[in-house]
Image: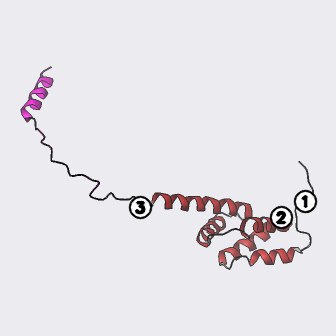
Amino acid sequence: MFSKRKCGRETEKKAKELKTLVSEMFESENWKSFTIRNFKTFSRYVRDQCLEAKRYFLVKDIDLDILEQALKYCLKNDTVSFSNLNDTYLYFERAAQESQDTLREIPILNSEYQGVYESLEVTKRSLSVYKELLGKEVLT
């Protein structure tokens, strides 16, 4: 499918306005560093990057701790597109969700459900039986 780029772009706002809006979405220093590097790396596609940033991070309920983790990862690994940041955020979000699921407390049964058991009598074999068996193996 082919389409013109300006069909999906916000052409009523200037690129500088879009950059300012995206830069001010979060107050984190990592966010500011990320946006600066993004706009520098994708200078030709600033409008597209701003559109992705707004789509992924503006209207959603974003966990700031997970976002910080994703920003640090993307800055460290030099993957500074908003699409990569979104994918990284979703990965860390899933990982956090899974860790919460595994840490969920297992309910302990009350003593009324755990009946009282009588101790079992266990017989012990004499070691001579095993020594005899081992002795036969050595001879053969």
- Left or right of 17? Residue 31 is left
Give the crowd class for mark 2: few <14, some 14-19, many >=20 residues within 10 Å. Answer: some
Residue 17 visible? The answer is: yes
Residue 100, percent across and down?
Answer: 50, 62
Q: Tell me: residue 48, above or below residue 15.
A: above
Query: Mark 1 is on which residue type?
Result: Arg
- Looking at the rendered structure, the secondary structure element under dot 2 is helix
Residue 81 visible in the shown view: no
Give how far across and how far down residue 40 sits, in percent: 79, 70
* Gap between marks 2 and 1 measured at Cα: 9 Å
Category of crowding for the residue at label 1, using alpha-carbon neighbours closer than 10 angstroms: few (below 14), some (14–19), many (at least 20): few
Q: CA distance from mark 2 to mark 3?
A: 45 Å
Residue 63 in picture, x, y percent from top left: 61, 70
The quadrant of the rendering that contains the C terminus is top left
| Comes first in the chain, label 1 or label 3 | 1
Name the residue carrying label 3: 105
Badge 2 or badge 1: first in the primary sequence: 1
Q: Amino acid at mark 2?
A: Asp
Amino acid type at mark 3: Glu
**Dot 3, crowdedness within 10 Å: few (<14), some or many (≥20)?**
few
Q: Which mark is residue 48?
A: 2
- Which residue carries the number 1 mark? 5
Residue at the image position 68 percent from the left and 74 percent from the top: 31
* Nearer the camera: disc 1 or disc 3: 3
Which image quarter: residue 107?
bottom left
The stretch of residues the image draws in magenta is 111-140
Q: Secondary structure at mark 3?
A: loop
